[in-house]
Amino acid sequence: MIIVSHKALKTNRDINIFYGDSILKQQRHFKYLGVVVDESLAWKNHMSYIALRVYPKLKLLNRNSSFLRPAISLKIYKMTILLILDYGCIVWGLYSKENSDILERLQSKAMQIIRRTNHLTCTQSMRERLGLNC
């Protein structure tokens, strides 16, 4: 994989790298230690990977939240979902507004499930009540 800027990616796509007599196949992205790295470091593939891992856990939390106290739901969130959202953020943390919005939607949905509120509830007040201000 060759990592370049978006501009360089558009202008110079055909770069052949030889290993012996064969040309190495270029990859557009790969997963390394649980972080999906793409060729322009845009992190779109990683955000998709995060969403694919988080959505099933949110569904399960939603199904079980009526049987659990909010404090228990919050602990489950921190132990299962928040770890996924935070993992590797030191590497991919400089992300675009689009990627930031994806993370914000996932966190907001989790807070709505924990607090048993709807999508109209203020996200900031939910964060404060749950003690999730960073």
Image (tube, rainbow, N blue to C red):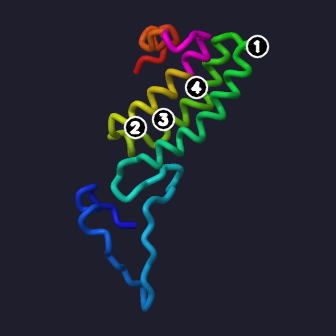
Q: Position of residue 117 (x, y in %)?
A: 58, 10
Label 4 – label 2 distance at C-alpha: 21 Å
Closer to the observer: label 4 or label 1?
1
For the record, the magenta segment spans: 110-120
Q: In the rendered structure, which disc, 4 or 2, sits on the residue that comes first in sequence?
A: 4
Q: Which mark is residue 67?
A: 1
Distance (Cα) linking label 2 and label 1: 32 Å
Q: Residue placed at 42% from the left, 39% from the top? A: 89
Name the residue type under label 3.
Asp
Residue 60, horizontal then vertical, whole percent: 70, 28
> Which label's residue is closer to the chain start, 2 or 1?
1
Query: Between disc 1 and disc 3, whose residue precedes?
Result: 1
Residue drawn at the location 32% of the way across and 75% of the way down:
15
Q: Secondary structure at mark 1?
A: loop
Q: Which residue is mark 2?
A: 99
Q: First in sequence: mark 4 or mark 1?
A: 1
- Residue occupied by mark 4: 78
Residue occupying image coordinates x 61% and y 17%: 113
The one of 118 and 74 positioned closer to us in this rendering: 118
Q: Are marks 2 and 3 in contact (CB under 8 Å)?
A: no
- Percent across and percent down for residue 128 are 45, 10
Q: Nearer the viewer, residue 77 or 122?
A: 122
User: In the visual, does 8 lie left or right of 102?
Assistant: left
Magenta stretch: includes residue 109: no
Looking at the image, tell me whether mark 2 or mark 3 is earlier in sequence order: 3
Q: Residue furthest bottom?
A: 21
Q: Is residue 91 above or below residue 126?
A: below
Mark positioned earlier in the residue sequence (4 or 3): 4
Q: Is residue 114 magenta?
A: yes
The amino acid type, in three-letter code, at marker 1 is: Phe
